[in-house]
Amino acid sequence: MDIKALYAEFLQHPVITTDSRDVPAGSIFFALKGDTFDGNQYALSAISQGAACAVVDDPNISGEHIIHVPDVLTALQQLAHYHRCQLGTTIIGVTGTNGKTTTKELIAAVLQRKYNVLYTQGNFNNHIGVPKTLLQLTKDHDIAVVEMGANHPGEIKTLVEIVSPDYGLITNVGRAHLEGFGSFEGVIRTKGELYDFLRDDQGTVFINNDNPHLLGISHDLQLVRYGQTPSDDLLVQGTLLECNPFLRFQWNSTVNGKQSTVNSIQTHLIGSYNLDNLLAAACVGTFFAVPADDISAALADYTPSNNRSQMTLTADNRLIVDAYNANPTSMAAALDSFAHIKADHKMVILGDMKELGDVSHAEHLAVLDRLAQSDLQQIWLVGSEFQRAVSERPNPLVRTFPDVDAVKSVLSAPDGHLRDYTILVKGSNSTRLTQLLPLL
């Protein structure tokens, strides 16, 4: 079946599913394959559950409402791209090492004050999540904000070719997924694939004017600038006022040579590193003519979720939870920010940073060196990488655990409960540190 015929089927049945356990009536089931499963095996079951048809790439599967394609994933991606082109919706593509999900949500919150906005839900930012997001576009949407993630070279290029964004924003580039990228330079090149597409397509980039790595790859692009350092060519400039623990800032915009000053905004975000994310959203909103008061209200109202820079007050402790992802750049930023929070009893529970390849040991040692300079009462480190690092750099304040279950055992013991602490909980999602929250 060619893409136009598949699109005609989609227009009749505009609900997509890739999960045979969740098959809405009248949906199209795409039989994707993974390392441990083959969706083709569930195609007939999906139809029996109410799917209008199933898209498969196994020639041995036949029956009514079965659609054969050479490759199901490619078909899904091509369908999403075709749908995006048919609608012509204005699309902003967002990527970066850290902060892309928060920035995407802040941008969406701001733009929703004026427009009907579709945006990536959660962090569905990969080769499957991105096309599924695009296929939710309707003619009623004014703007879409699409998050794109990557951990190997070429992945952003693949995603931008599906999305064809009109505008782009890279939050930052940092030392993450080095096992896949090979080096920090590999990170820059891969994230810069968004710029490459927009350069060829005469698109526009929103850029942090304080980031030399991004400026270094922004040649021959139409730039809309934001930043903390005052400059005549900024559309939006902001200043951090306080972060203890919640971030308070002020910002101003310069439109057609006229500068407006906005009073300070108290946010629900923790961490000074979030200021750049807030300014990015203010910049996008200003560019798209969202009134300044609406921008400020949206940024003040936004409350983080999914264990990203969240403050949780329990009966016993005050928790700062940033346990969705961790890499050397985000870990350093979180520890620096935590150091400025005023509290009598402070401790950290940190989990291993994953996918760092050959530099993993050195990067975990660097975290230990940073912790040695900190003013903390307790330091709990979880995972084999931290255990190995501590064996070389012992610290009397440090307690190590092989995994999260070992920490849970300690906290569940009669004498193991923690009280009256302000605790930073941070680690890669795979370390499962969020399982500790009910015990804290």
Image (cartoon, rainbow, N blue to C red):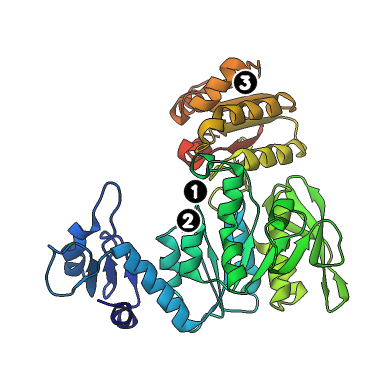
Mark earlier in primary sequence (1, 3): 1
In the picture, which quadrant includes the N terminus? bottom left
Residue 14 location (% of width, % of height): 35, 77
Mark 1 or 3: the one toward you: 1
Front-most of 380 and 359? Answer: 359
Q: Which mark is residue 151?
A: 1
Residue at the (57%, 62%) spot, across then down: 194
Q: Residues within 10 Å of mark 1 (few under 14, many from 20)?
A: many
In the picture, which quadrant includes the C terminus? top right
Residue at the (50%, 83%) spot, across then down: 140
| Image height of 123 relative to 259, above or below | above
Mark 3 or 2: the one toward you: 2
The residue where tag 2 is placed is: 155
Mark earlier in primary sequence (3, 2): 2
Can residue 313 be seen in the rendering of this structure?
no
- 408 left or right of 64? right
Residue 128 location (% of width, % of height): 40, 60
Q: Give the SS element for disc 1.
A: loop
| Image height of 152 relative to 65, above or below | above
Q: Which mark is residue 168?
A: none
The residue where tag 3 is placed is: 398
Front-most of 289 and 419? Answer: 289
Q: CA distance from mark 2 to mark 1?
A: 7 Å
The disc labelled 1 sits on which kind of residue? Asn
Q: How many marks?
A: 3
